[in-house]
Image (cartoon, rainbow, N blue to C red):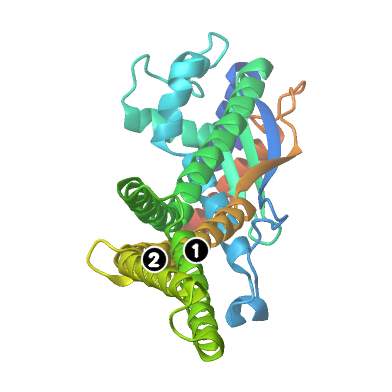
Amino acid sequence: MARFARRNKWFLLVVVAPTLLLATYLYALASNQYVSEAHFLVRTQGGTTAAPASGIGAALGLGGAAGGAASGEAQSVSDYLTSHDVVDTLQKRLDLVKLFRRPEADIGSRLPMESPTPEYLLRYYQKQVDVYYDTDTGITTLKARAFRPDDAYRLTSTLLMLGEQRVNEINIRGFADAVALSRRQLDEAERALGQVQTQMTRFRQSERDVDPAGTAQAQIALVSRLSQELSAARAQLATTQALIGGASPQVEALQQQIRSLERQLAAQNGRLTGGSSTIAAGLGGYERLRIQQELLAKRYEAASASYEAARQNAVRQQLYVARIVEPNRPVKSLYPKRALTLLTVFCGLLVVYAIGWLIAAGVREHAA
């Protein structure tokens, strides 16, 4: 045995001893770590998943705006779940430091410091939490490791909830940005329409006329009727004078009627077109306001339709998290992978030893 040890001391030192030390640590000291896993999709209200176009579709730009937006937001959610922002939130909600420093955790696996710096805590967290976004399917896989099954489950569930909250925040900002311009245009059109309607109300109050256009039409009809009556009276007077002469009481009555009609017609014409305070002058101002109101009403209708279209489009582009696989509560530990780790290290050391042996053999051969 001693002879074998002397002849193979380098093999024992380089390969066997480190492997035995690692085996002792893995099987005697290393703590079990449990993994909770969840899968989710980021989708739009229209059903578009976050998977972008690939191959020829991507080259030709056939991925679609909604799909591209969902893909970008899905990747931003994945980035958020491994950021210092989420670490700060988890520290407040779950006491992340305590969760990673459980008493049963071995010294080589647990968080070494009770008060780590934010940067160190983030690095350790990123070793314990894995977020993978599959660009082909659009599915995001979330895995969290902890020293207790409940801790792993709580960590994954909280991360999934935080991802949903981030998507909601993105929706709120995106919706506000999408409808901001059309909402501003609608507000401006509404204010302008309200102002001209107020001016029309003041005009009616100052003129004491609810419907200036109707009043003008009624006045025109009255002038037309008086003109017709005056023409008829004059024709009747001419006929009467031709039949019975000019000294008849009937002729005097007709002449008096004609003079009365002429006075009424002159008065009504004066009221219609006689000066600055006549119906025609007031109607001009009212018509300007009415035309302005019609134009602003059309502008308001167009702005309202534009706003509604922008709102519906923004709603169609709203994102939500579709849970494909809910977080599981682990029963069996998956880490550390003792046999695989031991075999990998043993093979690696064996390769190192073989390379060293070949180098040493070459040196001895040249020396000889």
- Upstream in sequence: badge 1 or badge 2: 1
Side of 72 where 123 appears, left or right: left
> Residue at 54% across / 52% down in the picture?
73
Instruction: Tell me the element at label 2.
Output: helix
Circle 2 residues within 10 Å: few <14, some 14–19, many ≥20 = some
Residue 358 in the image: above or below residue 280: above
Q: Is residue 112 above or below residue 53?
A: above
Above or below 190: residue 269:
below
Q: Amino acid at mark 1?
A: Ala
Task: Check residue 264 in the rendering and tell me which mark sits there, or answer none.
Answer: 2
Which one is in front, 32 or 6?
A: 32
Q: Position of residue 209 (x, y in %)?
A: 40, 50
Observer able to see residue 347: no
**Does the CB distance between marks 1 and 2 fall below 8 Å?**
no
Residue 44, above or below 91: below
Residue 274 in percent (x, y) is at: 27, 70
**51, 45: nearer the viewer:** 45
Q: How many marks?
A: 2
Residue lying at 34% horizontally and 22% vertically, measured from the top left: 116
- Identify residue type, mark 2: Gln
Q: Nearer the viewer, residue 196 or 272?
A: 272
Of 354 and 210, the residue lying toward us: 210
Residue annotated with mark 1: 218
Q: Is residue 204 left or right of residue 136?
A: left
When asked about the image quadrant of residue 6, the answer is top right
- Image quadrant in which the N terminus is located: top right
| Identity of the residue drawn at 37% across and 50% down | 204
Q: Nearer the viewer, mark 1 or mark 2?
A: 2
